Amino acid sequence: MRTSRRSLVLACILSAVLAASGDAQDRRTRVLEDREEFLSKGRWIYNDLERGFAEARKSGKPLLVVLRCIPCDACRGFDEEVAGDNPRIRGLLDRFVRVRIPQANGLDLSLFQFDYDLSFYAFFLGADRTIYGRFGSPSTQKDRTGAVSIDAFAEAMVAALDLHARRDAVRESLKAKTGARPQYRTPEEYPPLSKRYTSTIDYEGKVVQSCIHCHQVRDSERRMLRDARTPIPDEVLYPWPLPDVFGIHLDPRRRAKVERVDPGSVAERAGFRAGDELVALEGQPLISIADVQWVLHHAPARGRLEAKVRRGEQELDIEIPLEQGWRRASDISWRATTWDLRRMGTGGLLLEDLDAAERKRLGIATDALALRAKHVGQYGEHATAKRAGFRKGDIIVAVDGITRHMTEGDLIALAVQKKKPGGRLTFTVRRGDERRELSFAVR
């Protein structure tokens, strides 16, 4: 399945807006129907992880745990293919104990560490909680196609089954797939969530209002840093980088195969070629693009990563250099959690960089700042820019005197890393033939 990443995220945002305006009942129905359907068919264990582990110990099978945000339309079609036993994976599914978890309430964050911006994610586990791998990714930073495909999922399942069969031999290489103990054991223990949620969904009452969405974990982490007046570090601002940051583009239909390499990129200089298969990264066996992201998510600010690559009949070792600030090449504009970053840093503005043709028409250099307000928030803290005088269509050409090219992500980083809450940003804005000076305090 290939779909627009921006469309997927906007679908999530739209579903939240619709819920606030009266669609909560429909979302409630979808959650209840999902529960009824899975409980009636009996092929999946529904929302009972411990029962899944018990069944895995009894049967000797590995676990497939799917984490799915039911109300969100993103990845809905792919989820239905998995849940409906698509013929491509039907036989493989039978070799797993299958568990479906439809909310983040009560989720064990020491085990389930993943890209919280996604609405479908899968873990492959042993009965002893060993993680064989993860599945669930966007595919690129730029073309915005989704990486969730049945073919890639099937390859990940095959690879997980192979690791399960060889688990004693590969156990040491799998240890790094489990992260460090988190600050909070479950999402509802985060201070921004603790007074609003419990460890379970209220299926008999306020189903929608009682459900924690995965992205709220990342939102809470950032809010706590802002409340402490601490700059949001790169590893929190740019989570789960794709190898695109080095110029490596992986095929979304495959396990971890290089589709193309950007000319002149870090990847090309390191020796990567189109057609290479990433077998391991930092000693960890890879079963999907998500496994690559896991390693990058935990990579240092500077240093090197060791990759094992299969090229035809050869196996090669390639080192990827990590230069200071390498994460900042990540595009975070598509992420649901960036919505709250806009509240903090851009006053509720949704910004887009002008393309080359429009820059030429307006006489703006390619290396100059030119961010257009695609949307101006209208309510609450998302209306900070509106109250400061911003209008849809305004083009930002300077921020605090900076006129060099910046992406929306760069501007957000300036706001949440260089400015404490209450600090002001001053903008020069083009509105038609006029220039205006506008200013507001970041949150």
Image (tube, grey):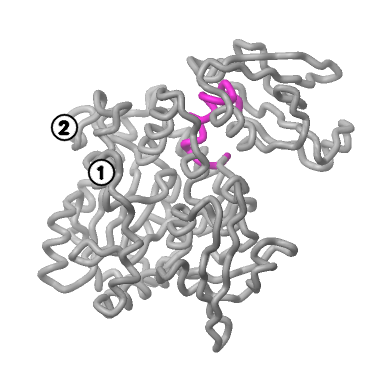
Q: Position of residue 154 (x, y in %)?
A: 40, 70
Determine the residue positioned at 58% across, 65% down.
320
Specify few, some or many for label 1: CA neighbours under 10 Å numbering under 14, 14-19, or 20 or more: few
For marks 2 and 1, the one nearer the N-term is 1
Q: Is residue 265 left or right of residue 309?
A: right
Tell me residue 192's x, y (percent).
Answer: 32, 26
Image position of 213 (left or right of 130)? right
- The image shows residue 112 at horizontal and vertical percentages of 30, 51
Residue 18 colored magenta?
no
The range drawn in magenta is 333-349
Residue of label 2: 204
Q: Residue at x 33, y 35 (%)?
A: 27
Query: Going 51% across and 58% down the picture, which residue do you hit?
Result: 147
Q: Of 173 and 35, which appears nearest the observer?
A: 173
Query: Where does the image place residue 203, in percent across and percent down from the top left?
Result: 18, 35
The label shown at residue 185 is none
**Is residue 347 one of those drawn in magenta?**
yes
Tag 1 secondary structure? helix
Image quadrant assignment for residue 376: top right
The numbered disc on residue 33 is 1
Q: Which amino acid does the dot numbered 1 rest on?
A: Glu
Q: Is residue 191 left or right of residue 16?
A: left
Mark 2: amino acid: Glu
The span from disc 2 to disc 1 (Cα, nearest Å) is 13 Å
Secondary structure of residue under mark 2: loop
Identify which residue, 386 or 308, lies in the foreground. Answer: 308
Vertical comparison of 21 with 3: above or below: above
* Residue 98 occupies quadrant: bottom left
Vertical placement of residue 181 versus 21, above or below: below
Residue 250: which quarter of the image?
A: bottom right
Residue positioned most to the front: 303
Residue beneath the point at 33% across and 48% down:
68
